[in-house]
Image (tube, rainbow, N blue to C red):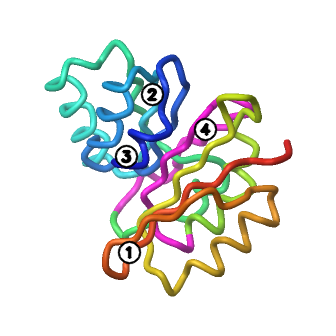
């Protein structure tokens, strides 16, 4: 959440991938962004929708069940049940910032999809990758570098890591 406070500016288009409870969705909306909250878990989608409504930001948020790009082919990221076909969000140059608090293997699988979904502009091209431990940091950093992302900063809490990347090329 601290990283969202540093990087979200009003009028940004933000994707919260793996929205879960919706806390990051609400934070981005309260900071003035228009947000798409996306999760492949029906319970998480319902939770995000409730959190959005309770926090009065429904006019700034679209909550969807599905995944970004290749994420549709990964099944439920935590081993739960998903619909037989997961809706695919095929975004191109649509978002200024993506916040993804998801497993390391999913980050690596979606590196190209993140690049494709982000707008490389003066205010855009930001990716906040979190939800993984320090032992995955080199692999994630390498996967994103291969797709044109550069590390901007990193936050740590015990073994957990959150990295801010910036898209350097489209």
> Depth-wise, is mark 4 or mark 3 nearer the camera?
3
Boundaries of the magenta span:
81-105
Residue corresponding to mark 3? 19
For marks 1 and 3 on the same chain, the one whose residue lies earlier in the sequence: 3
> Depth-wise, is mark 1 or mark 2 nearer the camera?
1
Cα separation between marks 1 and 3 = 18 Å
State the image quarter where residue 96 is shown: top right
Q: Secondary structure at mark 2?
A: strand
Q: Position of residue 167 (x, y in %)?
A: 74, 47
Residue corresponding to mark 1? 160
Which residue is at the far right? 169
Residue corresponding to mark 4? 89
Q: Secondary structure at mark 4?
A: strand
In the shown orientation, is residue 27 left or right of residue 108? left
Magenta segment's dominant SS is loop
Tell me which residue sits at (51%, 87%) in the image. Answer: 135
For marks 4 and 3 on the same chain, the one whose residue lies earlier in the sequence: 3
Residue corresponding to mark 2? 35
For marks 4 and 2 on the same chain, the one whose residue lies earlier in the sequence: 2
Tell me if residue 56 comes above or below residue 3 in the rendering: above
In the shown orientation, is residue 6 left or right of residue 120? left
Q: Position of residue 49 (x, y in %)?
A: 26, 31
Tell whether position 94 is magenta: yes
Cα separation between marks 1 and 2 = 25 Å
């Amino acid at each position: 959440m601290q990283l969202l406070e540093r990087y979200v500016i009003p009028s940004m288009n933000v994707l919260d991938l793996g929205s879960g409870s919706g806390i990051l969705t609400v934070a981005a909306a309260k900071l003035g962004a228009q947000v798409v909250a996306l999760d492949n878990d029906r319970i998480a989608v319902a939770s995000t929708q409730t959190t959005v409504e309770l926090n009065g930001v429904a006019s700034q948020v679209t909550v969807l069940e599905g995944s970004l790009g290749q994420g549709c082919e990964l099944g439920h990221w935590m081993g739960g049940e998903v619909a037989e076909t997961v809706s695919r969000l095929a975004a191109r140059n649509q978002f200024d910032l993506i916040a993804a608090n998801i497993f390391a293997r999913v980050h690596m699988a979606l590196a190209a999809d993140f690049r494709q979904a982000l707008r490389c502009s003066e205010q855009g091209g930001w990716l906040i990758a979190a939800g993984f431990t320090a032992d995955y940091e080199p692999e994630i950093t390498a996967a994103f570098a291969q797709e044109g992302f550069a590390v901007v900063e990193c936050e740590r809490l015990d073994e957990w890591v959150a990295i801010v990347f910036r898209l350097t090329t489209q």
